[in-house]
Amino acid sequence: MMFGFPAALLKHGYIHGVKHFKRFASTNLLRTCLYDFHVENGGKMVPFAGWEMPVQYKDSISDSHNNVRTQAGIFDVSHMLQTKVSGKDRIQYMESLVVGDIAGLKPNQGTLSLYTNNTGGIIDDLIISNTDQGYLYVVSNAGCADKDLPLMMNQAENMRCKGLDVKVDVICKGLLALQGPGMVKVLQPGLKFDLSELPFMTTRSATVFGIDDCRVTRCGYTGEDGVEISVATERAAELAQHMLNSKDVDCRLTGLGARDSLRLEAGLCLYGNDIDENTTPIEATLAWTIGKRRKEEGGFPGADIILKQIKDKPKQRRVGFTSSGPPARGGTEIYDESGEKVIGKVTSGCPSPTLKKNVAMGYVEPAFFKPGTKVKFLVRKKMVDATVTKMPFVPTNYFFGK
């Protein structure tokens, strides 16, 4: 075995001596610092974005899903790319890559943003937090690490060549997401600060269950109240066990299967399925990620195309659907109500454990954007009735403060 990040990153010299991830030659897949912990706890490991990750544990995906909606679940998201952007020109640097108003972030406030390309397409989605320790804490998708990190490093070097001060470092730590209405009861006993002081999309450094040098960020990918905790790799399993030991909440390890159905019920995009380099923020109904000042000033990649689409309707847009019968999956063709004209394609879909009906999202032509519009899916060579539905399908429970 050997240790390392994806080969492309090692090749370009961005990572040196990292002991965070294990690559096994027999599978050519990476393993997070919690791999052994997953196996010991009955995790069913599957390939995902170049990694071996748990799709589920001993309970069913539906049971895991419902447990997160009613209690709490722990997700291993250590495969995500964590980076630290420092230097006095870090804001200018970050705004040259993303659509968000990073200058407008208060200390310890974060935002979801998007890397875009020169044609307005989405390179990746990411969360950027403006820490009170003089750097930006950035978390982006594991499956995009081999393009995100070169993008960041190359732009940093370009700006340094112009005399600007910016530095990008990879944070080699584990990352655990604790999600669900029971999150506070699980986590609060292990903290020295009150979680009511940490509203949605804020972050702080902390000691968690006696483990120093953690970072707790109130965010998540389920629609429920939750946090993501960055923790030293060698203590990630210890942290997970502390949370599993909760006496007040049924807190369980939860896999990718439930993570996908939870995020879909919450109307959240999966990169590579619902958004990619051929879809713009406007088409993806992510215009809200573009800060007001950025809409006025531009200055981000693809700004001319994206800002024009704000004024003019895009040729396609991401919308939600509900249906009964066999569920539509990614790639399913969408037809008008007559079933004669193809109007788009489903990008994600599944049976909703919460709603007991099928939910999906996909892209359709302008005439079919409005909620309540009747359409049809071609599933298993049969037409299935579906309805354009406002997202999120299940109301979110984010905590915005008292």
Image (tube, rainbow, N blue to C red):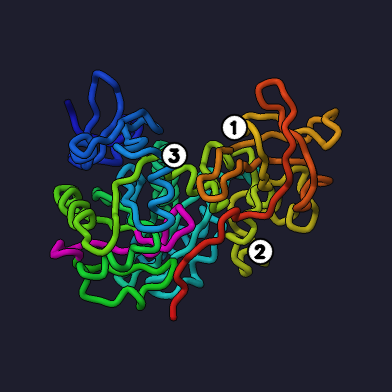
Residue 222: image tag:
none
Query: Disc 3 marks which residue?
Result: 144
Q: Secondary structure at mark 3?
A: helix
The kind of residue tagged 1 is Arg
Q: To which quarter of the image does residue 242 belong?
A: bottom left
Residue 193, how many percent across, how many down?
Answer: 25, 76
> How many marks are shown on the rendered structure?
3
Q: Earlier in the sequence, mark 1 or mark 3?
A: 3
Residue 271, how many percent across, how many down?
Answer: 51, 41
Residue 329: image tag:
1
Which residue is at 82% across, 30% downward?
Answer: 339
* Magenta region, residue range: 208-227
Residue 295: image tag:
2
Q: With respect to residue 118, does 89 lie above or below?
A: below
Q: With respect to residue 108, does 264 lie above or below?
A: above
* Disc 1: CA contacts within 10 A as few (<14), some (14-19) or many (>=20): many
